[in-house]
Image: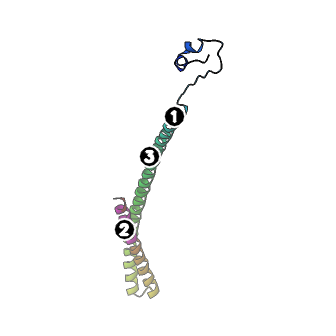
Amino acid sequence: MPLSIKCLRTLSGIYKNPLDRQMGTISITAPILDGGQAKYNQLLAKNSLEQADLQEVITQQNITTQVKSILSQARQSQNTIRYTEQSIALAQKRSQRIADLYEAGKLTIDQYLEAKRFYRQLMFDMNTARVNYWKIRYAFI
């Protein structure tokens, strides 16, 4: 005697007629793949957050390094300007002394021109240092 569909819906209906055991099925559905996908998405989101945090730290370190480098270059340019200004003051005195000696006939024209060339080179170096200083300063702003 086959079991009716109505009897199959309840567990007690399966055992109503114990001699009729032709087939019995129990099925369970569980969202295994959906749970796995949700966990995978959660791990991806966590990984993306960690990457963003690391990228932020790296960016802050790069900015700090660049600022320190620019400030160092500016200090170096200021020091170069100070050194060159001191050298120019000495070169002016030397140039004036050599001009006086040249006019007195105690030096040759070559010595006089060498002193003038040295003075002009120092002026050029100082102006170059000033230009570099202002380039660095305005690049930072």
What amino acid is at disc 2? Arg
Q: Pointer 3: residues within 10 angstroms few (<14), some, or many (20+)? A: few
Q: Quadrant of residue 71?
A: bottom left
Q: Which is nearer the eye, 12 or 69? A: 12
Q: Nearer the viewer, residue 6 or 69?
A: 6
Relative to 101, 46 lies left or right: right
Residue at the (36%, 78%) spot, across then down: 96
Callout 3 amino acid? Glu
Up-down: is 114 above or below 88?
A: below
Quadrant holding the C terminus:
bottom left
Q: Please report the bounds of the magenta region as a residue range.
A: 127-138
Q: Which of marks 3 and 1 is nearer the N terminus?
A: 1
| x then y, percent, for residue 5 | 54, 20
Between marks 2 and 3 in the image, the one whose residue lies nearer the viewer: 3
Q: Name the residue under label 1.
A: 34
Classify mark 3: helix, strand or loop: helix
Q: Name the residue under label 2.
A: 130
Q: Alpha-carbon neighbours of circle 1 within 10 Å: few (<14), some, or many (≥20)?
A: few
Q: In which quadrant will I find the N terminus?
A: top right
Disc 2 from disc 1: Cα separation: 67 Å
Residue 39 in view (yes/no): yes
Viewed as shown, does residue 43 lie left or right of 22?
Answer: left
Mark 3 sits on what residue?
56
Q: Main secondary structure of the magenta part?
A: helix
Q: Which of marks 3 and 1 is in front?
A: 1
Q: Which of marks 2 and 1 is in front?
A: 1
